[in-house]
Image (cartoon, helix red, strand yellow):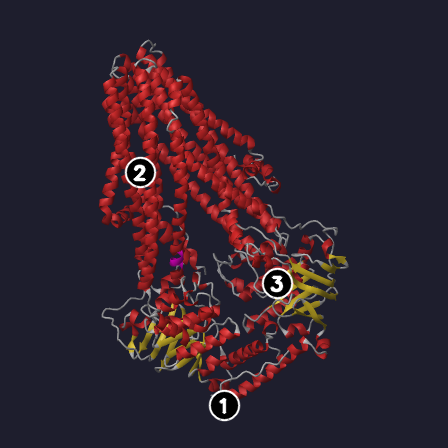
């Protein structure tokens, strides 16, 4: 069933996970001096912001009201100086926090990628590529945001509230108490709204991806839609989703529209109280004009740090959820690990033995049962049989992508778990049915087989693989870009490049998965000859589809439902008139039809 | 709230967007507003009123300060003054709230209108369009571009309106308070606006580069993950780590560059803003000191000044963003402008019963390539002479003639590109023929409404497209009516897929595709057969390709087809001599022409392509026997193909 079921994601967590937060902190400890740096800078900025308001008060009281021009000039100078100083602190904290954020992302992506390289094949079998990708890309970004801008905003907001209250106390402590009573109310309201808004947006995003999915399917399947005259019905169905989206988005906007006014109105009660009480105080000379002005400024400004706190708190829940997922990837343990004392034998002859090997991906479903096989160095074994018969499993086991559930696999007589993975994998060459190339040039892709190969060696390998001819026909020859995943080359060309890559690697044991899809005759012949050249003198396992390859093999295994049902040479098996006979004649017909050019419309048996 | 909104929405959704498209993008955006203009206008008014409330707040502050300083105020007044602040906040909040909800209703309403329209529009665009446009391109225009338009209405247009309103209202008030101060308050302003405009223009380019690098990094990651077998098989982990690190480091470097730009811009624009503040502060403080203005006025001036400077800082950013909104409008309008396929009109009444007599009489057809949906950049790139050559019509069917009676089985035989699929496309009116006559039950096909034709023709394709919904829904997908579970199960049984469906834990509720089970090619084909059975069409089109399935499945599919075919005019896109042999009419196609037609018995008697194929088939059978003999007697002989006979 659907493997992706386990990977539905919860976008944010409601419970506060202290352990995860601690672990996030540990991630950034190497950069503690950067963090200290931007925290100091933002603290200075925050105190400066509060002081500006106080400066405004002094300007009124000591300059204007006192009619002291000298003091006024002095205060203006201080104001100007402070501006310059703040410009410096702002530069510092934006730079420090921003660059640190990029750095943390860089580190985390690197760590994740490196860990991925160590993980076993089974992990990639079970985990969708998209899931892993969003861990490495978006989640790492969210964590970096938390430890930089998140910390920064919290520091600024908290300090701003505290220093503002301090300055207020300095001006008039009774009025300050009124304000101090109102701040928690504003904070509570902000938190409440932020939480609701975040939840609503999650709903919007969910619906948005449903809408994208609906578009995708309707466009991809437009032929069926038209042929079945489904247009009206589809529109009705789509309208329901898009309306839900409308309502969810509207609700989110409604909450946002309500949010600031509500908090501001709470603040306005504070302003009203200050005016009323402050006005009374002024009559008994307890507060100055500048003092009242300062209070009004502080009160109308305090909404920003408060709503910042609420925002960071809400975002933190998302970041913690992101971190949990990232850590789950980092904590994933590889299934196949080198044993204690595993070694590299230095030279491999290529003798391979399967002894009573049984393998299953999940309990109760054996894909390979009591498999026994002994292959001499240099022997060519063809493996044939229907899909799901266990052919790919043999490849996976031999490469030690997986290890047998029971039984032993030996290479040159040694249990291969006593060797390092690197020792095995660097001596096994694999040519896959759908060859995977990497973005870059042809040369780079061939050199993938041996990284220190010279250009001459690369070309030599290409010649052996019969790939050279097509490569030099290309505009830029070996420097031609292959495109993402090799998409600019044809399947046959990709196969040739991957054969050349394997030639360069010069493995002792070879695994070839022949392509079923037919390519043009010329390339086909080249692939064929390339493969032959590659196989010469190496122990080879060929998952074969072409009759010529099959017939040439020293031994043919017919695999069905995880067991060997027939084994022998071509003539032995033809004589047996069993599974192989059926498979062979069927394939023979197909190949002949292609030869005569009637394969297109006469593929099946007329018997 | 919800029901009332729904009702209002329905009225607005019927709006025809196509007639609203305009070359001038701003005019186009204005027309799209139809039905929402008053609401949007209301939001604008709320913004202006909000700006006035802001100004009056400072007026009240001014009054409070001045009366307190003069101390000539009655203490009874104080509570009222205090309350008036609350009142002003409530008013300001109300206007902010109204702006928020009205603009949201407008922007979300228009987004909904666009989404629904595009969804319907795209599925009704002709094949000629879909042939030339990539799915991803259409999806992007329907999602991210629509979202950019939504943001244009929700944030950018109103944001600019808000800045203008605050600027005008506050400046007017300042000028009325004191002309000199008013004029001084905008001295540095042009520099702030220019700086932000310049900066945000630059930064958006740097940001694009950063995003490109991000995409590159994703590619490396994705290739590594999808190619994990190769990486492991060559033990190239260290190499991959290096490769990833290079791109990752480049991204870090670009990100750093972007941040340095930001870390310079913000302090510089801070200093500019502060310069403006200090200038006004110094002048008006001196005036207040000399008694030319009151202290209250001074405080009000400083307050209003904040609301002139602060919004201006954002103007540059908004202008840059608006331009992306305009680009998105153009991209969406490009799709909307395309002509739909008319599926309802035609002189034949929609409830006509179709018998299924089809006559092709000298029918010719060419694909006429169209130039659709190209980006400006692509247009420039493609403007070579060789591209123009490609745009010539390509004739794919030439002078096709054959006829069949209701209930006949017609086999279309030919290689890829011979025109088999094009004949089917004409029959369903996916395309219209240019010459000759094609009639159904004696009436020219062009007289039939497309929906009538398509409702009466069922298709079972080689690789049928199933939708990612339950198997039940997939089978019922084309029935065009409510169907019961029993009917669905009957169809599934007849299509030999019922038993397989029952092996899934969720049975008929099993979701097909990425989020559920992956069906094999043969299973998909049988679901499609069940789908066609429920639709109960008069004419059936079968793409009879069974080469990809094993013998057992092949037999099951044949049995399923045996239930489906009788009583319907059936067109078989044939790949097998066996099916062809029993057909009432075999049409042999080559390069868009009919080279032979007749029954099997007739065709094997005359020389031609059909007999060639037939003979080759027989020859191959002889060769199979020979090959087996050879395998037994001379095991080491390498097989050499016989010379290819000239056909």
Circle 1/circle 3 CB separation < 8 Å: no
Q: Main secondary structure of the magenta part?
A: helix
Chain of the residue under the numbered disc 3 shown in the image = B
B526 vs A232, nearest the viewer: A232
The magenta span reads B218-222
Callouts 1 and 2 on one subunit:
no
Q: Which residue is mark 3?
A: B460
Chain of the residue under the numbered disc 1 shown in the image = B
Q: Which residue is mark 1?
A: B634
Residue at figure coordinates x 34%, y 16% from the top left = B296
Q: Which residue is mark 2?
A: A153
State the image quarter where residue A339 is shown. bottom left
Residue at figure coordinates x 25%, y 25% from the top left = A77
Count of number-bearing discs = 3
Callouts 1 and 3 on one subunit:
yes
Query: What kind of element bears circle 2?
Result: helix
Instruction: Give above or below for B511 relative to B166.
Output: below
Chain of the residue under the numbered disc 2 shown in the image = A
């Amino acid at each position: 069933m659907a493997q992706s079921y386990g990977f539905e994601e919860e976008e944010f967590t409601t419970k506060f996970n202290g352990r995860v937060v601690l672990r996030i902190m540990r991630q950034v400890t190497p950069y503690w001096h950067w963090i200290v740096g931007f925290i100091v800078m933002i603290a200075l900025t925050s105190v400066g912001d509060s002081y500006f308001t106080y400066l405004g008060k002094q300007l009124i009281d000591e300059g204007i009201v006192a009619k002291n021009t000298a003091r006024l000039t002095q205060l203006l100078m201080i104001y100007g100086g402070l501006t310059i100083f703040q410009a410096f602190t702002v530069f510092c904290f934006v730079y420090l926090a921003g660059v640190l954020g990029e750095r943390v992302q860089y580190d985390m992506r690197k760590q994740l990628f490196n860990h991925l390289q160590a993980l076993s094949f089974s992990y990639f079998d079970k985990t969708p590529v998209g899931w892993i990708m969003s861990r490495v890309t978006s989640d790492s970004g969210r964590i970096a945001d938390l430890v930089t801008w998140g910390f920064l905003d919290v520091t600024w907001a908290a300090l701003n509230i505290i220093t503002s209250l301090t300055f207020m106390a300095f001006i008039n402590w009774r009025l300050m108490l009124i304000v101090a009573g109102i701040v928690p109310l504003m904070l509570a309201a902000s938190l409440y709204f932020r939480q609701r808004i975040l939840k609503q947006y999650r709903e919007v995003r969910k619906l948005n991806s449903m809408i994208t999915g609906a578009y995708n399917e309707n466009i991809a399947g437009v032929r069926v839609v038209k042929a079945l005259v489904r247009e009206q019905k589809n529109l009705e169905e789509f309208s329901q989703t898009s309306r839900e989206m409308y309502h969810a988005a509207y609700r989110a906007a409604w909450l946002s529209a309500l949010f600031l006014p509500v908090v501001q109105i709470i603040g306005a009660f504070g302003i009203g109280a200050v005016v009323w009480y402050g006005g009374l105080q002024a009559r008994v000379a307890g507060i100055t004009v500048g003092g009242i002005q300062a209070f009004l400024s502080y009160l109308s400004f305090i909404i920003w740090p408060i709503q910042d706190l609420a925002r960071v708190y809400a975002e933190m829940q998302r970041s913690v959820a992101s971190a949990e997922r990232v850590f789950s990837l980092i904590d994933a343990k590889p299934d196949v690990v080198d044993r204690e004392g595993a070694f590299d034998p230095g030279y491999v002859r290529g003798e391979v033995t399967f002894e009573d090997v049984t393998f299953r991906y999940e309990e109760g479903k054996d894909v390979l049962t009591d498999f026994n096989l002994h292959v001499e160095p240099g022997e060519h074994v063809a493996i044939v049989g229907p899909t799901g018969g266990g052919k790919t499993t043999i490849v996976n086991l031999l490469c030690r992508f997986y290890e047998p559930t029971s039984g032993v696999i030996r290479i040159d007589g040694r249990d291969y778990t006593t060797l390092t993975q690197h020792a095995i994998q660097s001596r096994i060459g694999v040519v896959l049915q759908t060859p995977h190339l990497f973005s870059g040039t042809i040369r780079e892709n061939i050199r993938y087989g041996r990284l220190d190969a010279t250009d001459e060696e690369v070309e030599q390998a290409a010649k052996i693989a019969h790939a050279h001819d097509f490569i030099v026909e290309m505009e830029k020859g070996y420097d031609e870009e292959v495109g993402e995943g090799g998409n600019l080359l044809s399947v046959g060309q990709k196969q040739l490049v991957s054969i050349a890559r394997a030639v360069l690697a010069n493995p002792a044991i070879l695994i070839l998965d022949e392509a079923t899809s037919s390519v043009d005759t010329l390339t086909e012949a080249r692939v064929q000859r390339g493969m032959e050249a590659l196989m010469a003198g190496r122990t080879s396992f060929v998952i074969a589809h072409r009759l010529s390859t099959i017939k040439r093999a020293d031994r043919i295994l017919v695999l069905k439902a995880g067991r060997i049902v027939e084994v022998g040479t071509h003539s032995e098996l033809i004589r047996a008139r069993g599974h192989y006979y059926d498979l062979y004649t069927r394939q023979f017909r197909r190949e002949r039809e292609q030869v005569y050019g009637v394969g297109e419309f006469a593929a099946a048996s007329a018997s | 709230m919800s029901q009332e909104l729904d009702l209002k929405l329905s009225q607005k959704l019927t709006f025809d967007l196509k007639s609203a498209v305009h070359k001038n993008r701003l005019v186009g955006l204005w027309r799209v507003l139809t039905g929402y203009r008053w609401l949007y206008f209301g939001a604008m008014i709320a913004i202006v009123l909000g700006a006035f409330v802001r100004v009056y707040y400072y007026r009240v502050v001014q009054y409070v300060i001045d009366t307190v300083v003069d101390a000539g105020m009655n203490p009874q007044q104080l509570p009222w003054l205090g309350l008036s602040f609350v009142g002003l906040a409530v008013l300001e909040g109300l206007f902010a709230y109204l702006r928020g909800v009205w603009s949201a209703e407008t922007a979300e309403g228009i987004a909904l209108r666009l989404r629904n329209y595009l969804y319907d529009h795209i599925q009704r665009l002709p094949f000629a369009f879909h042939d030339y446009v990539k799915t991803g391109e259409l999806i992007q225009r329907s999602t991210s571009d629509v979202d950019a338009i939504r943001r244009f209405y929700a944030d950018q247009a109103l944001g600019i309106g808000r800045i203008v309103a605050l600027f005008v209202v506050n400046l007017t008030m300042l000028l009325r308070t004191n002309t000199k101060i008013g004029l001084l308050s905008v001295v540095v302003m042009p520099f702030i606006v220019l700086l932000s405009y310049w900066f945000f223009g630059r930064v958006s380019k740097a940001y694009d580069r950063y995003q490109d690098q991000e995409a590159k990094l994703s590619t490396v990651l994705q290739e590594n993950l999808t190619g994990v077998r190769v990486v492991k098989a060559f033990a190239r982990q260290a190499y991959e780590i290096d490769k990833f690190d290079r791109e990752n480091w480049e991204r870090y470097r670009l990100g750093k560059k972007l941040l340095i730009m930001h870390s310079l811009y913000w302090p510089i624009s801070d200093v500019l803003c502060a310069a403006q503040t200090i200038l006004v502060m110094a002048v008006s403080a001196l005036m207040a000191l000399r008694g030319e203005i009151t202290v209250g006025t001074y405080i009000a001036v400083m307050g209003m000044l904040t609301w002139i400077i602060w919004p201006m800082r954002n103007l540059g950013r908004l202008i840059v963003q608006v331009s992306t909104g305009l680009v998105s409008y153009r991209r969406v309008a490009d799709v909307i402008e395309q002509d739909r396929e008319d599926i309802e009109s035609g002189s034949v009444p929609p409830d006509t019963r179709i018998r299924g007599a089809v006559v092709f009489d000298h029918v010719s057809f060419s694909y006429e390539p169209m130039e659709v949906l190209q980006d400006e950049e692509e247009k420039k790139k493609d403007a070579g002479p060789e591209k123009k050559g490609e745009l010539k019509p390509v004739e794919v069917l030439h002078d096709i003639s054959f006829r069949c009676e209701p209930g006949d089985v017609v086999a279309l035989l030919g290689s890829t590109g011979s025109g088999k699929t094009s004949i089917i496309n004409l029959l369903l009116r996916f395309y219209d023929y240019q010459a000759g006559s094609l009639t159904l039950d004696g009436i020219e096909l062009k007289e039939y409404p497309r929906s009538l034709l398509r409702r009466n023709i069922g298709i079972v394709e080689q690789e049928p497209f199933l939708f990612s919904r339950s198997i039940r829904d997939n089978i019922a997908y084309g029935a065009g009516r409510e169907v019961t579970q029993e009917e669905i199960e009957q169809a599934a049984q007849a299509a030999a897929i019922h038993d397989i469906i029952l092996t899934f834990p969720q049975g008929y509720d099993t979701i097909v595709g990425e989020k559920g089970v992956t069906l094999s090619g043969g299973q998909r084909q049988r679901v499609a057969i069940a789908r066609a059975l429920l639709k109960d069409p008069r004419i059936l089109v079968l793409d009879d390709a069974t080469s990809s399935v094993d013998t057992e499945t092949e037999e099951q599919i044949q049995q399923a087809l045996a239930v489906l075919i009788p009583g319907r005019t059936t067109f078989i896109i044939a790949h097998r001599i066996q099916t062809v042999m029993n057909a009432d009419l075999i049409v042999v196609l080559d390069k868009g022409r009919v080279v032979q037609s007749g029954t099997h018995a007739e065709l094997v008697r005359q020389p031609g392509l059909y007999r060639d194929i037939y003979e080759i088939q027989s020859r191959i059978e002889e060769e199979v026997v020979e090959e087996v003999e050879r395998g037994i007697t001379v095991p080491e002989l390498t097989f050499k193909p016989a010379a290819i006979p000239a056909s």
